[in-house]
Image (cartoon, rainbow, N blue to C red):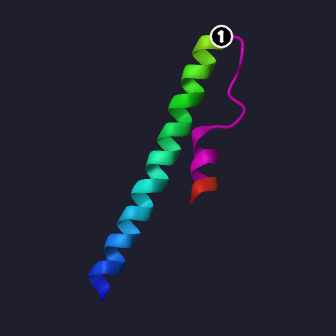
Amino acid sequence: MPDSSDVYKSLIMLIKFVLWAGINVLRYIEVNQCGQQKLTLSPMVDQNILL
């Protein structure tokens, strides 16, 4: 059933995107609260890890 496999692929991509976005949002909040912390990884590195 090709339709179901496409749906699963879409869900996996959506989950990866949500995780990637959530990591960036949490890091952004953490950096703003502390002020002195700097980003250790760029968003592209996080995206490559998830992909």
Residues drawn in magenta: 36-48
Residue 20, given in percent of the width and then of the height, sits at 52, 45
Instruction: Determine the residue positioned at 50% across, 30% down.
Output: 25
Task: Using the image, determine if residue 10 lies above or below residue 50.
Answer: below
24 above or below 35?
A: below
1 to 37, vertically: above or below: below
Residue at 64 percent across and 54 percent down: it is 49
User: Which quarter of the rendering shows the C terminus?
Assistant: bottom right
Residue holding disc 1: 35
Task: Give me the residue at 58% from left, 40% from top.
Answer: 43
Q: Position of residue 37 (x, y in %)?
A: 71, 18
Q: Amino acid at mark 1?
A: Gly
Residue 6 painted magenta: no
Label 1 sits on a secondary structure element that is: loop
Quadrant, the N terminus: bottom left
The quarter of the displayed image where residue 30 is located: top right
Report the residue that reaches farthest toward the left. Answer: 3
Where, by quadrant of the figure, is residue 36 drawn? Answer: top right
Tell whether position 47 is magenta: yes
Q: Residue 3, located in which quarter of the rendered image? A: bottom left
Residue nearer the viewer, 42 or 6: 6
